[in-house]
């Protein structure tokens, strides 16, 4: 899935943060933003905000089962060692064994995401002190696209 940074960021930067938000007109949380971006580029995913991501399942199962609802059994994520444009970045920002924050890698160490303290959608660098030690992994969409 090729990701063109200008298309992703032009209309998303500054959209307000909204807990469990999945609509650009009202605001996004991190998961809603990721679903919006992936769907723009043809991935068939939907938000699944009602699931607790702090289970004892392996992180790859967490991505499939909890980050996104699975409307088609052929949808899939593959872990990758190095980030690629369009992959998701999972992070752990609170104590516990599993991720609780997600963004989309853009390029040159930058990722787009939203969180309460940012006030809205922003671009940050993975090397910034707030983020560099919180990365749990990178995952590439390998499921169906439109």
Image (cartoon, rainbow, N blue to C red):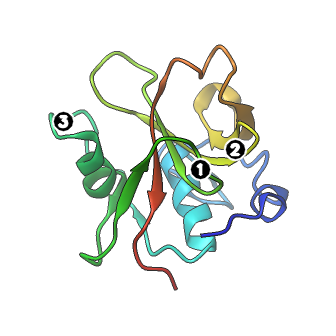
Specify the farthest residue to the left. 56
Q: Is residue 97 left or right of residue 36?
A: left
Which residue is under mark 1?
28
Q: Which mark is residue 16?
A: 2
**What's the distance in space between the residues labelled 3 and 2, CA to CA?**
29 Å
Rendered residue at 65%/13% (across/down): 129
Q: Is residue 113 above or below residue 99?
A: below
Q: Is residue 14 above or below residue 98?
A: below
Q: How many marks?
A: 3
SS category of the residue bearing label 3: loop
Pointer 3 or 2: first along the chain: 2
Residues at discs 1 and 2 in contact (Cβ within 8 Å): yes
In this view of the protein, which residue sits in the foreground, 16 or 72? 72
Q: Which quadrant of the figure has residue 7?
A: bottom right
Whole-percent x, y for residue 10 in the image = 84, 58
Which residue is under mark 3?
55
In this view of the protein, which residue sits in the foreground, 117 or 100? 100
Mark 1 crowd level (few <14, some 14–19, many ≥20, 10 Å Cα): many
- Residue 50 is at least partly visible in this image: no
- Residue 126 is at least partly visible in this image: yes
Rendered residue at 33%/71% (across/down): 75
Rendered residue at 24%/33% (across/down): 54
Select label 3 or label 2 by which is in front.
3
In this view of the protein, which residue sits in the foreground, 10 or 27? 10
Q: Which mark is residue 88?
A: none
SS category of the residue bearing label 1: strand
Mark 2 crowd level (few <14, some 14–19, many ≥20, 10 Å Cα): many
SS category of the residue bearing label 2: loop
**What's the distance in space between the residues labelled 1 and 2, CA to CA?**
7 Å
């Amino acid at each position: 899935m090729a990701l063109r940074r200008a298309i992703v960021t032009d209309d998303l930067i500054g959209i307000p943060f909204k807990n469990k938000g999945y609509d650009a007109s009202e605001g996004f949380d991190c998961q809603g933003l990721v679903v919006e971006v992936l769907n723009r580029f043809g991935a068939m995913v939907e938000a699944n905000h009602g699931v607790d991501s702090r289970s004892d399942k392996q992180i790859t199962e967490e991505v499939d089962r909890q980050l996104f609802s699975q409307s088609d059994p052929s949808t899939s994520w593959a872990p990758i060692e190095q980030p690629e444009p369009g992959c998701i970045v999972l992070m752990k920002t609170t104590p516990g064994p599993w991720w609780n924050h997600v963004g989309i890698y853009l390029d040159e160490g930058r990722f787009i995401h939203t969180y309460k303290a940012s006030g809205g959608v922003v671009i940050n660098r993975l090397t910034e002190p707030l983020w560099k030690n919180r990365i749990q992994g990178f995952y590439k969409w390998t499921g169906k696209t439109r």
